[in-house]
Amino acid sequence: GGLLPILKEVIEILFQEGLIKALFATETFAMGLNMPARTVVFSSAKKFDGKDTRYISSGEYIQMSGRAGRRGIDDRGIVILCVSHKMEPQVPKDLIQGQANPLNSAFRLTYHMVLNLLRVEDVNPEFMLERSFYQYQNTSSIPFLANKLQVAEAEHAAIQVPNEESARTYFNLRQQLQKLQKEMTAYINKPRYILSFLQPGRLVKVKHNEDNWGWGVVVNFQKKGKQPAGSSDPLYVVEGLFRCATPILPNVPPKPCPPGGK
């Protein structure tokens, strides 16, 4: 990793010719290259994936360990896994006996791609799309999805709700009550009604969409400088003290502190 392309190509050629006896490489070396070796050594069972340090997945282990053993040269390949810390028994079991990562197409159809296909002569875009791996995966999943739909429909038909009519009436009443509560809250939260209560030191409870900020303290309030055109009620900016989740990043809206957090 980090080498110039010409140096990588030279190393690949020397490795294929058997002139390099030991090669230290990242897992990228085992992806998509036909570079078999007699022995594959894992210096650690963990890796840093850019965010956290985690155990290598079963798919990564299968991909890299599969390079052990040269066809026509070695009777068997040798894989050595260096374990430098205590591991739970289930971790190596899942690592060695687990399934490989599923292969899913990352194909995404865009207008730019369609226009490029139309520019090429003797190329039918529909013909190419129908024979893509993405379309193959979608077509092959149709029987499974149809069977899953039949099972779900059968389960739905078998459901029996006692006093279903009463439950439906109760649900409709709850929906109407929630709607009225939202309308009433939006009405009483207008500045003309709550401005007299927003005095410094007053406790307020704030909930915005799905974020429940809980109780906080009003510090100050002031009229917003730029008012929207055609608005009958002026807007105000209220400053308050609330518990925020850490870390607070620049240009990222803060989030309320979760229960039990600091």
Image (cartoon, grey):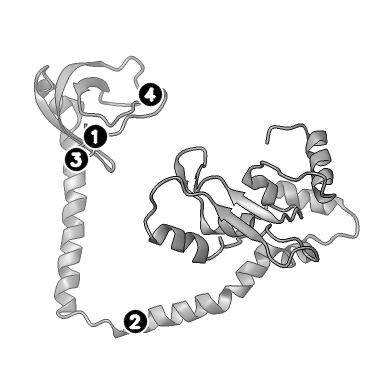
Give the mark nearest the N terminus, 2 or 1: 2
Give the mark nearest the N terminus, 4 or 1: 4
Secondary structure of the residue carrying tag 1 is loop
Q: Amino acid at mark 2?
A: Glu
Q: How many marks?
A: 4
Q: Amino acid at mark 1?
A: Cys
Identify the residue under disc 4. Answer: 229
x and y percentages locating residue 106 in the rendered image: 63, 54
Q: Pointers 4 and 1 in contact (CB under 8 A)?
A: no
Identify the residue under disc 3. Answer: 259
The residue closer to the viewer here, 215 or 236, is 215
Q: Is residue 258 above or below residue 168?
A: above
Whether residue 224 can be seen here = yes
Q: Nearer the viewer, mark 2 or mark 1?
A: 1
Q: What is the spatial separation of the Cα atoms under label 2 and label 3, in whole angstroms? A: 38 Å
x and y percentages locating residue 215 in the rendered image: 14, 32
Q: What is the spatial separation of the Cα atoms under label 4 and label 2, in whole angstroms? A: 54 Å
Give the mark nearest the N terminus, 4 or 2: 2
x and y percentages locating residue 20 in the rendered image: 78, 44
x and y percentages locating residue 56 in the rendered image: 51, 51
